[in-house]
Image (cartoon, helix red, strand yellow):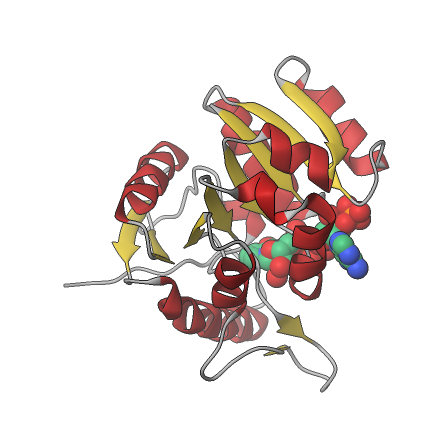
Amino acid sequence: MKVGILGTGAVGEALGRGFHAIGADVTMGSRSAGNEKAVAWARSLGERAAEGSFADAARFGETIVFATKGSAVLDVVEAAGADAFAGKVVIDATNPLDFSRGYPDLSVKGEDSLGEQLQCAIPEAKVVKCFNTTNASLMFRPDLAGGPPDMFIAGNDAAAKAEVGRILDQFGWLVVDCGPILSARWLEAMTMAWVHAARVKGHWRIAWKLLE
Ligand SMILES: NC(=O)c1ccc[n+]([C@@H]2O[C@H](COP(=O)([O-])OP(=O)(O)OC[C@H]3O[C@@H](n4cnc5c(N)ncnc54)[C@H](OP(=O)(O)O)[C@@H]3O)[C@@H](O)[C@H]2O)c1
């Protein structure tokens, strides 16, 4: 599997490392090739890990992960070119976080979401909202006392969600399918509940579980 990771932050680093660990060839992209964090990340993994621009990583990936700052997502699509995503599974791990009010909030909410905006910007891609409801440190093989947590996902394409489900299985997660990409608005809202709970608890080692 060839995976393009768009983002050099904690999420890009963790998911890139996870995909590499399950045997994928991974290219991490940033605003410019030669990004210090991306170079260090690729060097630490050795074979099957490379870095480049956002466009390089998007073109490389058969599966692509968005792990950029939420406010930059649409600019990154423009930088990479929408064509680079056509026909591919695009995992959207981003959140439209807004800290301008002095507490964490969403800059896109209500009857819209960043996941929906991304799907609109790359209509020929199969966007699956995933990984946005937990901390980067838990994204690959979380070891929580309560057992494997649930990853809530949303997307319009059933085959793409099945593919993401297989990835999640290897990453140590159970899957809760929340329907079409429209549900990204609720998955992004879940982030706010999780972020504020983590602030009260004083740690980030929490994840969701749906009990039936
Ligand atoms: N941190 C977490 O635990 C966590 C958990 C769940 C979801 N998320 C979401 O996942 C995403 C990534 O989070 P993160 O903490 O790993 O990193 P981040 O600091 O939110 O984002 C870092 C990435 O955003 C890119 N970026 C920043 N400003 C940009 C701009 N103006 N134009 C283009 N690209 C820009 C950076 O590019 P360069 O590489 O060029 O610097 C870098 O690759 C965010 O949307 C976040 O809300 C985070």
Q: Please report the residue visible at 40 percent of the width from the left and 73 percent of the height from the top.
A: 186
Q: Please report the residue visible at 36 percent of the width from the left and 56 percent of the height from the top.
A: 153
Identify the residue at the far top of this view. 47
Front residue of 186 and 141: 186
Front residue of 185 and 89: 89
Q: Position of residue 151 (x, y in %)?
A: 36, 53
**Quadrant of residue 160 in the image?**
top left
**Quadrant of residue 179 in the image?**
bottom left
Say whether residue 184 is visible.
Answer: yes
Q: Please report the residue visible at 34 percent of the width from the left and 51 percent of the height from the top.
A: 149
In the rendered image of this protein, does residue 89 appear above or below residue 19? Answer: below
Say whether residue 147 is visible.
Answer: no
In the rendered image of this protein, does residue 114 appear above or below residue 29? Answer: below
Q: Position of residue 67 (x, y in %)?
A: 61, 50
Please state, as top left, top right, bottom left or bottom right, where the C terminus lies in the image: bottom left
Front residue of 193 and 2: 2
Q: Position of residue 71 (x, y in %)?
A: 69, 66
In the rendered image of this protein, does residue 82 appear above or below residue 18? Answer: below
Q: In this view, does 36 lie to the left or right of 44?
A: right
Front residue of 94 and 138: 94
Q: In this view, does 212 lie to the left or right of 38?
A: left
How many marks do you count on the picture? 0
Q: In this view, does 127 lie to the left or right of 107?
A: left
Q: Position of residue 191 (x, y in %)?
A: 49, 68
Quarter for ligand 1?
bottom right
Identify the residue at the far left of this view. 212
Q: In this view, does 148 lie to the left or right of 34?
A: left
Q: Please report the residue visible at 65 percent of the width from the left and 52 percent of the height from the top.
A: 77
